[in-house]
Image (spheres, coloured by chain):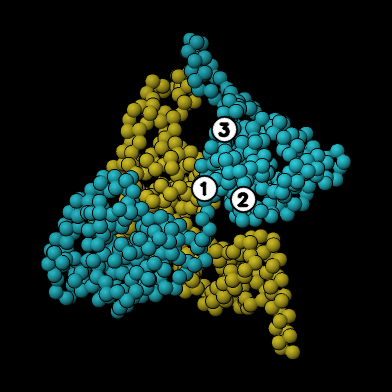
């Protein structure tokens, strides 16, 4: 009974791993589920699910798996124990998972479970805690609760209480908390952390312990306090994002990157600008291409220390990149490629992140003659280009670090 | 061996009402000795839960409220170098004894406590994004080493760890895997009635019903920036009952709305809603 639950959860993208399974097995062997499906539902949910957006998945899977099945508590436990005992027969496990499984003391769990069984047998008569009006079957087929879940009496479970939880599960109250977007802002945030550096600046108000001790020792033990400037983040970042047109399919990804970047607290300054297609003399402060900022202002305001990150698919018609632009001011009417080169020369560190798959550009792509000479290629020769994935971000930031160090 | 008969089960307290699913989650966390992660709307009593567990099980509570500047190390111990330097210079006390300058943080205290305690790590999402990962090892093994003295602080009895999160940052998977998770739902009208009754036992039934109806109507508005929650309702009812409004009609004009709605836009959109509903009524009357 449990296995379909686990695998169906996994199928739905709920990351249930060994740690959860073992936790659940342990909880069951302690008898926490009180041999009722109600309790099992609550316990399994609290162990298997870690995020309210997955609660709805759990409810659905649970009601699907347990609907109309004559379940008994013992099969739950037994299934899980059998499964844990025999991990090598499960090709779907990775090597890592298998290793993790080996470390687990399955035997101990099993022992615990059996002790529990014995204990229950002994206590049953006096305690009256466990229900057991029906005949108890021996160990082998065994389990604590021969009468099965639905006959559980007492406490606050209504007759047929085993079903009521299915009603709870069916109600799907957590639907609103679900988010089917594969949000991985966190991963992006972690990747963005790679791009940070610190510098000591500001007021001299932090105790420099090592130098204080050193100075004190040199001062024949008389205390000599040495202060220093606190360590502060010193990375300034300009994020330029292509919006609209061919970038529309990537809008969600871009907004994730944007929110991750906005939340990053380890940068001294973050400027975000938007453009469409390519740079033509000006960029915009808003996604809707309002509040234009002239490129000349950016060159004036930002010195070469800023790290420039372009985000875009770099795909456009060749004339859009190479032809003269239609900028307002006459002197700005130079082709987009010139703007890009000017930007690259102005900033010491710059990269281009491309949400479009890597197989389409870069070196491999040169050999593919039908594509050669496209704008992606031209731009990839101006800026180091990396895919907009977590790995790509890390690689890109690594390259920036190399340049500045 | 731990088993369900050997630990005291948590079933809520007089002041803190629970439901089955919350109780199972708490008891599961206690039995499996894993941290309990509580999420939910602000004002649904996440922090109070830890207090309730401590009260119900008669254990002391150690409260660690996490801030944006909190580091994992702060929870373990602090080495008060400044005090030591001061003492060495001005001769107050024995500065050779380094132990005197090790101050245990909340996590350290909960390990070092002679008996089992409840440790509340409040609003873990406030801290740096790596913070939960830095705690993994200590929470798993329930021990850490004080580097300055080489001593190891080992938990004699694993504390019951309750962690709350407001979802400001996502928590790392590795951390989540080790936790028992519970999402506190917003109470429905029945439970809310009981909760109100717990806090205001002498409250007039009429007033309570009307206040609840008004409250759920406001919560039902879809344009609110910040929806009022349990704690705001309790506050509001306190104000209502203390102001001596016994015979109120809480239908259109809601007094002391400031206790429920905390944003200016929300007041505006509420006024608008009242207006449209009134005009709607008038037109239907005519």
* Earlier sequence position, callout 1 versus callout 3: 1
Q: From the viewer's perspective, is residue A219 above or below residue A401?
A: above
Q: Viewer-proximal residue, A34 or A16?
A: A16
Q: Position of residue B91 (x, y in %)?
A: 45, 19
Query: CA separation, marks 2 and 1?
Result: 14 Å
Question: Is any atom of residue B169 visible in this view?
Answer: no
Question: Residue under circle 1?
Answer: A186
Question: Residue under circle 3?
Answer: A399
Question: Is any atom of residue B82 visible in this view?
Answer: yes
* Earlier sequence position, callout 2 versus callout 1: 1
Outermost right residue:
A330
The label on residue A11 is none
Establish whether labels 3 and 2 are both on one chain. Answer: yes
The label on residue A254 is 2
Q: Position of residue B180 (x, y in %)?
A: 38, 55
Q: Viewer-proximal residue, A335 or B219?
A: A335
* Picture quadrant of residue A297: top right
Q: Residue at x 69, y 41 (%)?
A: A271
Q: Residue at x 20, y 50 (%)?
A: A108
Establish whether labels 1 and 3 are both on one chain. Answer: yes
Q: Secondary structure at mark 1?
A: helix
Q: Chain under label 1?
A: A
Q: From the viewer's perspective, is residue A391 above or below residue A168?
A: above
Quadrant of the rendering where the C terminus of chain B is positioned: bottom right
Residue B95 shown left or right of residue A283 in the figure: left
Q: Which marked residue is nearer to the observer: mark 1 or mark 3?
A: 3
Q: Secondary structure at mark 2?
A: helix
């Amino acid at each position: 009974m449990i296995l379909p639950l686990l695998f169906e959860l996994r199928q739905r993208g709920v990351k249930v791993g060994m740690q959860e399974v073992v936790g659940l097995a342990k909880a069951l062997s302690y008898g926490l589920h009180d041999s009722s499906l109600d309790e099992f539902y609550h316990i399994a949910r609290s162990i298997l699910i870690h995020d309210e957006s997955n609660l709805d998945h759990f409810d659905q899977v649970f009601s699907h798996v347990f609907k109309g099945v004559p379940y008994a508590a013992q099969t739950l436990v037994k299934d899980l124990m059998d499964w844990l005992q025999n991990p090598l027969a499960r090709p779907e496990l990775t090597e890592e998972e298998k290793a993790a499984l080996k470390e687990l003391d399955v035997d101990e769990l099993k022992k615990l479970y059996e002790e529990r069984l014995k204990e229950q047998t002994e206590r049953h008569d006096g305690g009256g805690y466990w229900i057991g009006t029906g005949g108890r079957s021996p160990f082998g087929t065994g389990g604590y609760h021969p009468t099965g879940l639905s006959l559980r009496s007492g406490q606050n479970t209504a007759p047929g209480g085993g079903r009521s939880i299915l009603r709870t599960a069916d109600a799907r109250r957590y639907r609103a908390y679900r988010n089917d977007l594969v949000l991985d802002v966190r991963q992006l945030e972690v990747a963005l952390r790679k791009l940070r550096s610190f510098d000591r600046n500001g007021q001299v108000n932090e105790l420099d312990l090592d130098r204080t001790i050193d100075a004190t020792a040199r001062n024949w033990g008389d205390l000599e306090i040495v202060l220093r400037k606190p360590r502060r983040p010193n990375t300034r970042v300009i994020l330029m994002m292509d919006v609209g047109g061919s970038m529309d399919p990537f809008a969600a990804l871009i907004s994730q990157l944007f929110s991750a970047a906005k939340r990053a607290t380890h940068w001294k300054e973050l400027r975000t600008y938007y453009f469409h297609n390519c740079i033509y003399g000006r960029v915009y402060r808003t996604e809707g291409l309002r509040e234009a900022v002239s490129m000349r202002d950016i060159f004036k305001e930002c010195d070469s220390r800023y790290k420039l990150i372009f985000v875009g698919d770099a795909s456009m018609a060749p004339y859009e990149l190479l032809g003269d632009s239609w900028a307002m001011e006459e002197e700005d009417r130079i082709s987009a490629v010139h703007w890009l080169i000017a930007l690259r020369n102005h900033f010491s560190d710059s990269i281009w992140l491309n949400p479009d798959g890597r197989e389409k550009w870069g070196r491999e792509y040169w050999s593919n003659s039908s594509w050669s000479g496209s704008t992606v290629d031209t731009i990839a020769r101006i800026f180091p280009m990396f895919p907009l994935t977590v790995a790509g971000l890390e690689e890109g930031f690594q390259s920036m670090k190399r340049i500045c160090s | 061996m731990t088993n369900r008969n050997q630990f005291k089960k948590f079933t809520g307290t007089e002041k803190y009402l629970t439901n089955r699913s919350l109780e199972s989650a708490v008891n599961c966390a206690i039995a499996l000795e894993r941290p309990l992660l509580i999420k939910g709307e602000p004002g649904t009593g996440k922090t109070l839960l830890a207090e309730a567990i401590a009260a119900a099980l008669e254990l002391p509570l150690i409260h660690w409220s996490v801030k944006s500047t909190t580091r994992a190390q702060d929870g373990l111990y602090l080495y008060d170098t400044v005090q030591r330097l001061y003492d060495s210079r001005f001769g107050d006390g024995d500065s050779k004894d380094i132990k005197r300058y090790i101050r245990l943080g909340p996590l350290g205290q909960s390990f070092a406590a002679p008996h089992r305690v409840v440790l509340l790590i409040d609003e873990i999402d406030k801290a740096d994004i790596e913070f939960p990962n830095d705690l993994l090892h200590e929470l798993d093994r329930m021990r850490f080493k004080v580097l300055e003295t080489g001593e190891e602080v080992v938990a004699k009895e694993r504390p019951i760890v309750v962690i709350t999160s407001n979802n400001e940052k996502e928590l790392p998977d590795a951390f989540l895997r080790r936790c028992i998770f519970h999402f506190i739902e917003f109470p429905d009208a029945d439970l809310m009635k009981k909760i109100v009754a717990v806090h205001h036992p002498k409250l007039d039934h009429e007033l309570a019903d009307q206040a609840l109806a008004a409250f759920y109507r406001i919560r039902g508005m879809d344009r609110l920036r910040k929806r009022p929650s349990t704690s705001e309702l309790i506050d509001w009812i306190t104000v209502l009952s203390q102001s001596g409004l016994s015979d109120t009609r809480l239908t259109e004009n809601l007094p002391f709305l400031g206790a429920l709605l905390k944003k200016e836009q929300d007041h505006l959109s509420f006024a608008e809603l009242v207006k449209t509903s009134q005009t709607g009524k008038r037109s239907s009357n005519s």
